[in-house]
Structures are given as C-alpha cells and as structure tokens.
Amino acid sequence: MAVKIALAGNPNCGKTTLFNALTGSHQFVGNWPGVTIEKKEGKLKGYSDVTITDLPGIYSLSPYTPEEVVARTYLLQERPDAILNLVDGTNMERNLYLTTQLMELGIPVVVAVNMMDIVEKRGDQIQIHELGRRLGCEVVEISALKEKGIGKAAAKVVEVARKKEASVLFPVFPEEIEQSIRQTQAHLGDAVPEEQRRFYAVKLLEKDEKIAEQIGKAADLCAEITTLEELYDDDVESIFANERYGYIASVMQACYRKGSRENITLSDRIDGVVTNRWLALPIFAVVMFLVYYISVTTVGTWATDWVNDGLFGESWSLAGLAQVPGIPAAMESGLAAIGCADWLAGLILDGIVAGVGAVLGFVPQMLVLFLFLAFLESCGYMARVAFIMDRLFRRFGLSGKSFIPMLIGTGCGVPGIMASRTIENDRDRKMTIIATTFIPCGAKLPIIALIAGALFQGAWWVSPSAYFAGIAAIVCSGILLKKTRMFAGEPAPFVMELPAYHLPTAAAVLRSMWERGWSFIKKAGTVILLSTIIIWFTTYFGWVDGQFRMLEEMEINHSILALIGNTFAWLFLPLGFGDWKSAVAVITGLVAKENVVGTFGILFGFAQVAEDGAEYWGTLAENMTAVSAYSFLIFNLLCAPCFAAMGAIRREMNHRGWFWFAIGYQSLLAYVTSLCIYQIGTWVMTGVFGIGTLAAFLLLIGFGYLLLRPYPEARPLRGRKRRGRKALAIR
Amino acid sequence: MGTCIIALILVCVVALSIRSIRKDRKEGKSAGCGGDCRHCGGCCHDIGGR
C-alpha cells in the first residue's frame, strides 16, 4: 500500500538536503531560510511505494506566513501516514516548539535530530533515548549533509507509517488548560476526526481565525478563553506558547548536556568581522568586486577568449598536437562542400552561428560567476549579506528581507521577483518587485562582458561597477519611492536566523553552477536561436528601390530591422546610442537580455563582437564612444527586464496599473541615468557643454531633490491584494 | 540537394526548439527565464492556498 511521509521542520534545518539524500533528487539547497516555499515530492530511495513530501520550513503551525499555510493545509487535509520531523540539534529548544505542535496532529511522528556532527564537535550531548521517551515518539540522530543515519531515519519513519500508531504523549499543559482543551474537544464532537480533536481544540483556544472559520464554533469558547486569560493574566496565544516552552525546557533539562568547550564558535568569530558595524559593507563591496573582477576580467576572460578565438574562431590547438578548425570555419567549409545555397549558408553562419555563438562565447565567464555565487550562498555568507543589507535598506524604508529576492535575482530575475512573495508588507513587496531586476542577472553578464572587453579593453572597474550600479539603483529607488505617499511607512521588522558557516561540498557548488549555466545554454538553444533566425531574416531582407529582396552586406541599412530600429533610434540619441543597430539591440533585449549580444553578433559580424582585439571591433567602436558604450550598458542593466521577468512582475503585482508603473519607473530611471552618464561624461571628456548637458544637470538636480526631500505621511495602497494575503504577526 | 538537407535539418532544429519551449511552458517552466525552476520555488504557478 502506498505510504505518504511528510518532511517537516524549521527553516534552514537541512530539510531539502535530507530530502535530496532520501529521494536522490537535486532540489535547490540554499544556506539561508526560506528556500522552499512550496511542497516538493519524491520517491523514497529503496521503497518504491513510499512518497516523501518536503514541506516549506516553518516555526509553528500557526498560519502567519504563506509557508506555514502551505505546510499546515497539507498536514491537515492530505493526512500523511507519518511525519519525519527534522530538528536542528544545535538549536533544539526552538526546533522542538514545532515538534510539540506536530505531535498534536494525531499523525505518527519520527524526530530526526540533524547536525549531530556539529553537536559532537561542540562537545554537547543529546540523550536520544531519553528524548524519545519524553516526547513519546521515535528519535534518531542524523547528519543530512554527511548522509549519516538517514537510512535508519527512513526505515523508522516507514515502520511507524505502516503501523499507523500516533504518538500518545502530548505536551502536558497545566491542569486548568488541559481541562479547557478537554471541554473544547467535547464541543467539537464529530466535526473533526477524533485523532485531530486535540489540535483543533488548542487552535480554537488560541483564537486561530482560519480554524474557527473552518469549524464555525469559535463563539462557544469565549468563556473558556476569558477564564484562561484572567487566570494567567496574559493573552491566550502567549499562554500556550509559554507553556510549550516550559515543557520544552523540562525536556531539554533531562536530555541535553552542554559541553565544557568554549561557547564562541568559529562562525561567531567570523561573524564578529564580516557583520561588524563598520567593516560589513566594505567587506561585502570587496567580495562582490572580486567576484565580478575575477569572473569577467581575469579567469573568465581567459576561458572566454579561448571559446571565442578558438572554438568559435578560426581554429584552436589541441594540446599543441594539432590545429582543430573552429565551429564557424568548419561549418563554412562543410556547407560549401555539400553545395548549400548562399542564403541558407548565410542564415546559418551570419545568423545562427554568429548570434548564438556570440552568446555562448560568454558561458565560461558566466560559469565562473555562478561558481563564486554558489560558494558564497552555500557557505552561509549570503545569508549574512541580507542581515548586513538590512542596516542599509532600513535607512530608506526597506528591510533586509528584500535582499533575498535580489540575491536570487543574480541568477535570474524571474525567480527573484517571485521570491518577493515572502514579504508580507504590501508596500515593501511592491518596492522589492520594482527594484529586484536592477541587480544584474546572468543574462546581463554577456552585455557587461562585451562592453568591458570590447570597448574598455577589459578595464578592471567596468564589470564590478555594473553590479554596484544595480545596488545604487536599488538604494536610490528605495529612498525615492519611500518619499512618495504611495510607499511611505515604516519598514517591517526583519528577523533572520543566521546559519552556521560551513564549507560546502564541491559537488553541491558545482551542481549549482551547472544548473544555472545549463539554464543559460538551454536558453541559447531555444529562445536565442529562434530570435537569431528572425533577426537574420529581418536584417538581410528589405526594400531597395521599391523592391523587396535579399540584401547584400552593404545594403542592410535598407533592411526591415533597420526600418524598425530607425523608428525608435531617435529616442536614444540623447543617450549616445541613437543608431538603429543599438536601438534594435535594446528592443531584442526585451525578448531575452542575451539577445543584445546576439544582435550585435549578427549586425556587426561575429568576430567583431567576440574578439577583444582592436583590429576586430572597429565597426562596433565606430558606433560607440567609451561614454556612450557605458551609457548603453547602464541603460540595458536598469531598463525594463525581459518579457519573462515582465510577466513575473505582472503576476506578482496582480494589478495592471502597478505593472505599468513598475515598467515605466524602471525605464524612466534607466533613461535618466544613461542620459546623465552620456551628457555629463561627454562634457567631461570633450569639454563641450550643450543643451543636452544642461538637461542632464537639471535632471540631476531634480533627482537630488527627490532623494533629499522630507518623508510624507503614508496613504493606503490602491490595487487588488493577492488572494489570501494577510499581515504577518510578529512573533 | 545539399540545400534541401540543410534546410530540413534547420526546420527540425527549429521545431525541436519550439517543442522544448512549449513543453517547458506546459510543465510550468518559463523558457524565457531559462527554466531555472530550482531557484524558483514554483514561481510559474500558484502556490497552494493562493
């Protein structure tokens, strides 16, 4: 018979790591809380009839957060055959709070005490048998990361699931409370299954609105609740929480022995430096500078040069033994040998190979960047960054919680925007959605690398400056928007558990790097490939002397694409890239940001884009000065994101007006920033002060005023709220 | 003949690309975002209860 097991526990206690180990799947594991926001299912290895469900990390079964709603609804409605409750052994007291609630559900529970290797390292002792006796359920010790004890945990949970015997010992509340619970259980009658009655009774006494709505008998309990509140001189929810913690304290006293070793761990010592009030931000700046510098300018460039010059160039050397022709050269000779028509060869070589090749040429740089980001995420540093950024973000009205979506957005903006769901405050959530795509995502890296390499000769500051421009745009947008009545208001408090630092396994880091890199490659083979075909057709077909025909290389200024580009090009004149090719690149970038590079690949010829050498990128350089190239880079980084991310914004805003506000704001900010960069930059470089320079200074003054003016009073947000969204009660 | 073969291969590649995009879309993945769904936590479809 099929068995269903739920994996439940606090955030960041290792559930997804255990889930992956138990099922052999490769779900994303992040060393910060809130990675799993919906349940995931998999088959338990070695038990074909056992399904295991990884629930989001929760602190309790109260419906305060979306994660708690998802987990509780599953446990109550799906009724798994057993719960494998993962408990962080280094933080038992807080983790057991959830355990006491899970035990009330009438479902067999097996407690797996995780991170036992760290517990032992600290010299602490947990008396597992005594803990099991006190809790009234099976308890096993494991280390999910090192895959120790997980087989035993799996066997135990399957065994109890098949026996279907729920735990019998409940957290013992004082007699007065127990009496109220018994009376409430009697009130419930047959409204809920017998084994769930205690859970429902406790929740009704805690004034849980969702449960009261479901049962419809809340009014009957006023007398019991008032009696308890008068007796304990506290609100009923606090009474239950205090009594649970009292019970947990007694369990801890009997089962947990603190070691004699020093209490200050290595993590604490590292945190003393990296989260230091004065050092935290400079350290973060240095870390991100190094990440982008190494990825784009040094190691990544060496690899990219090989890909561009060798693999997608003329030829490459096979360990000095032989010269292997590059893909374009090999394809050109192959196509010529089988007598392929010129137009088709042109489509393949000048369109697909040039466009897709230009994008794929940046894969090595991207892999190096993803490798660094995966390491920083896995070791626990990025969780600290959210904490560090909280100090900065709080000054302009956002909390560090807003940094988590931005952190995820470094891979791809879409999941970053979606991650804003965990922000309960509607104003903060909307601001986070607007600002998330300012952080350069993986797709924008080729644009950064192209501009840094081709127009700045790999200058050390260009790529890190792109990341910091994104951070600056977020900070400025935060200040600017918070000073409007729509977004005014205090930021929500930010409470985050900092996970202990640990050295991630090479396999986990490499897997994370590969998953992100593969997404990029896959996209190049699908969306980018189709885009390049369309770009090639519209580039090499057009009207000459009133006749529609295929165009020669020199005639592409008469192409369909040129016609489209020229329609919009004037818009970008004040920004320094008012030619149709750049305008088209900006537009195709809306399909996918990599398309900017792919479009240049087709329009300027692949070699010019791929190579760093001055002899090759002359055509591109003719169209752009260094200042206009930087203006182009910043515009593409900050303007409206790709269609997929726009779709995500539309879904998350759930309101057409807010969606257009977000897109309009992003595009306007990008336009104004690029205009200021180009106009003021040109004035500095050439000394020519024109009307554009004046406009730039006026915009800068206006921008400064918007940043420095006083904060107004808040006013209610208009627009539809998401269904079921509810304000978070801070525990 | 060479043109026909190459054109046929190209049509197949395009068809496979479109199929892959449609398949990802049906599975709730977004081809536009690279299908980076492991970081997404079910972003392309509603989370239970919402």
Image (tube, coloured by chain):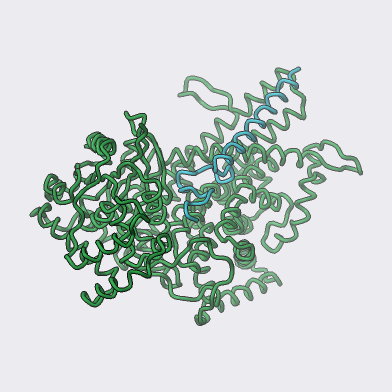
Chain colours: A green, B cyan
**What is the x, y in percent for residue A566?**
78, 53
Can the viewer see residue A522 in this picture?
yes
Quarter of the image with the C terminus of chain A is bottom left
A84 or A366, which is in the foreground? A84
**What is the x, y in percent for residue A515?**
45, 39
Residue in view at x 76 percent, y 41 percent: A539
A600 or A96, which is in the foreground? A96
Query: In this image, A158 relative to A608: left or right?
Result: left
Counting labels gives 0
Residue in view at x 75 percent, y 60 percent: A570
Query: In this image, A17 relative to A524: left or right?
Result: left
A266 or A3, which is in the foreground? A3
Can the viewer see residue A461 in this picture?
no
Residue in view at x 44 percent, y 68 percent: A398
Quarter of the image with the N terminus of chain A is top left
Q: Residue furthest right?
A: A546
Query: In this image, A383 relative to A331: left or right?
Result: left
